[in-house]
């Protein structure tokens, strides 16, 4: 199994490509035989010619690529599995928690499915971690987007014509995206406050020069993988009340609070957004998994009657496709390199490997991941 096929993305709004020419070149040098669907990199800015120069064959159609491939690579889950051959290894992000029927279909078709979001958050697997690579870019972009929609500048400015106070940012949820948002807002001169339910985050926030908002929610903690635990309705209510004043004083609120595999908690209610200042901007980065902000819309902007703008900030990395693709591609190349077996000149799917165990969802005609059986 060494034939890799890169597909053109079909999901509306997708701007990224799963492998860039530089990584095709590296994989070809390793021993993989690569092919790309014609136009796969066009939206991102890579031509068929660049892929050819890197060593890939250009396939005129998806069907031709499926016929060639042992391994299919793409960013998003495809609309259907028609034409994907039995025993093919399919690698993409998959939204596995919401796609139970699709997983079953892959199992029944004998397709081996790797879901990239399920790669364990371990040191060894860090270079394959699409959640981190994409979230850090999205966190950066959220600040740039907020700055571009705000009716004021971010830094303090003292001039003979007057003094401008710094914009106030409040970041709720300080994982990968939140940390990058704090760092970016600080670099641009904003005054930043932040909150996360995981106690270990306080030090990280302070080390970036931001202020940690203290809220006592009682017993908190994190899972083995470093994810937040789900709050009780009572704890969420305490958090909302404690945050309301900070939100009302902020020019920008960026929410990134997610709970892995579950719906995101609603942390800003209608009453809280109604109390915010006109011209304030909220970016709900959890909008794709239910949303942290009541009334946010994954399809776009919502302007409230009081002049507060809510932006549904799903997959913001799509606004910076070049860097997002470079990183995503690096993650996939690291995965294919990690499982390359030089002796057999093939990818080796060792079921006992911790990384493979974490992300292989279907194999041998059945669901093999313990979380989905
Ligand atoms: P995520 O996207 O699942 O969630 C974003 C943040 O929201 C998290 O920090 C979470 O604690 C927080 N959150 C959840 N509920 C909240 C609430 N009610 N209020 C406020 N905040 C809330 O998280 P992520 O960015 O994917 O990171 C998850 C963890 O994985 C972190 O601990 C991170 O350091 C760790 N991580 C480890 C590795 C590695 O070791 N290889 C790589 C990446 C991330």
Image (tube, rainbow, N blue to C red):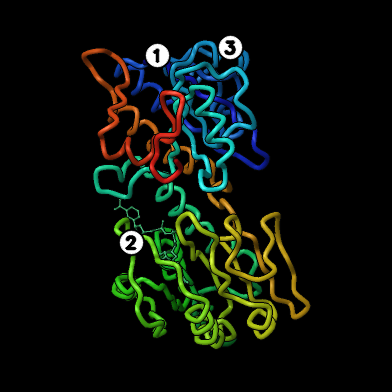
Q: Is residue 86 above or below residue 279?
A: above
At label 1, counting other C-alpha atoms closer than 10 Å, the crowd grade (few under 14, some 14-19, many 20 or more) is many
Q: Quadrant of residue 285?
A: bottom right
Q: Give the percent coordinates (x, y) of residue 72.
A: 48, 24
User: Any mark on residue 64, and which?
Assistant: 3
Q: Residues within 10 Å of mark 3 (few under 14, many from 20)?
A: some
Residue at disc 1, CB closer than 8 Å to ligand 1: no
SS for callout 1: strand
Rendered residue at 37%/43% (across/down):
119
Mark 1–mark 2 Cα distance, whole angstroms, equals 40 Å
Out of 116 and 59, give the one closest to the viewer. Answer: 116
Q: Quadrant of the C terminus?
A: top left
Query: In front of the other: label 1 or label 2?
Result: 2
Q: Is residue 367 above or below residue 189?
A: above
Question: Could you tell me if residue 20 is visible in this image?
Answer: no
Q: Residue furthest left?
A: 343
Q: Residue 307 vs residue 57: left or right?
A: right
Viewer-nearest residue: 253 or 199: 199
Which residue is depicted at the point 32% across and 21% down?
347
The extreme right residue here reads 305
Quarter of the picture for ligand 1? Answer: bottom left
User: Mark 1 sits on what residue?
Assistant: 33
Pick the front one: 47 or 341: 341
| Position in image of residue 238 (x %, y %) | 50, 84
**Spatial CA span between label 2 and label 3:** 44 Å
Mark on residue 223?
Answer: 2
């Amino acid at each position: 199994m060494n034939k890799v096929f890169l597909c053109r993305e079909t999901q509306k709004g997708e701007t990224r490509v799963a492998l860039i020419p530089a990584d095709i070149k590296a994989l070809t040098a390793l021993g993989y035989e690569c092919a790309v669907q014609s136009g796969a990199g066009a939206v991102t800015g890579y031509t068929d010619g660049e892929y050819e120069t890197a060593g890939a064959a250009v396939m005129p159609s998806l069907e031709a690529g499926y016929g060639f491939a042992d391994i299919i690579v793409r960013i998003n889950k495809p609309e259907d599995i028609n034409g994907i051959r039995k025993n093919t290894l399919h690698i993409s992000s998959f939204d596995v928690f919401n796609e139970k029927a699709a997983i079953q279909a892959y199992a029944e078709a004998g397709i081996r499915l790797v879901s990239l979001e399920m790669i364990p958050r371990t040191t060894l697997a860090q270079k394959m971690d699409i959640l981190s690579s994409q979230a850090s870019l999205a966190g950066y972009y959220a600040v740039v987007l907020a700055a571009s929609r705000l009716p004021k500048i971010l830094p303090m400015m003292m001039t003979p014509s007057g003094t401008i106070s710094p914009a106030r940012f409040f970041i709720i949820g300080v994982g990968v995206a939140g940390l990058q948002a704090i760092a970016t807002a600080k670099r641009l001169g904003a005054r930043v406050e932040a909150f996360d339910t995981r106690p270990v985050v306080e030090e990280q926030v302070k080390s970036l020069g931001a202020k940690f908002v203290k809220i006592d929610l009682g017993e908190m903690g994190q899972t083995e993988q470093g994810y937040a635990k789900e709050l009780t309705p009572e704890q969420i209510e305490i958090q909302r009340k404690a945050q309301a004043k900070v939100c009302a004083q902020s020019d920008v609120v960026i929410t990134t609070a997610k709970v892995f595999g579950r719906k995101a908690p609603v942390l800003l209610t209608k009453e809280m957004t109604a109390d915010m200042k006109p011209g304030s901007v909220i970016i709900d980065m959890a909008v794709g998994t239910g949303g942290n902000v009541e009334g946010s819309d994954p399809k776009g902007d919502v302007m409230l009657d009081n002049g507060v703008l809510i932006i549904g900030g799903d997959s913001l990395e799509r606004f910076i496709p070049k860097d997002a693709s470079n990183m995503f591609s690096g993650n996939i190349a690291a995965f294919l390199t990690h499982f390359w077996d030089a002796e057999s000149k093939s990818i080796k799917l060792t079921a006992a490997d911790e990384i493979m165990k974490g992300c292989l969802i279907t194999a041998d005609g059945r669901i093999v991941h313990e979380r989905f059986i």
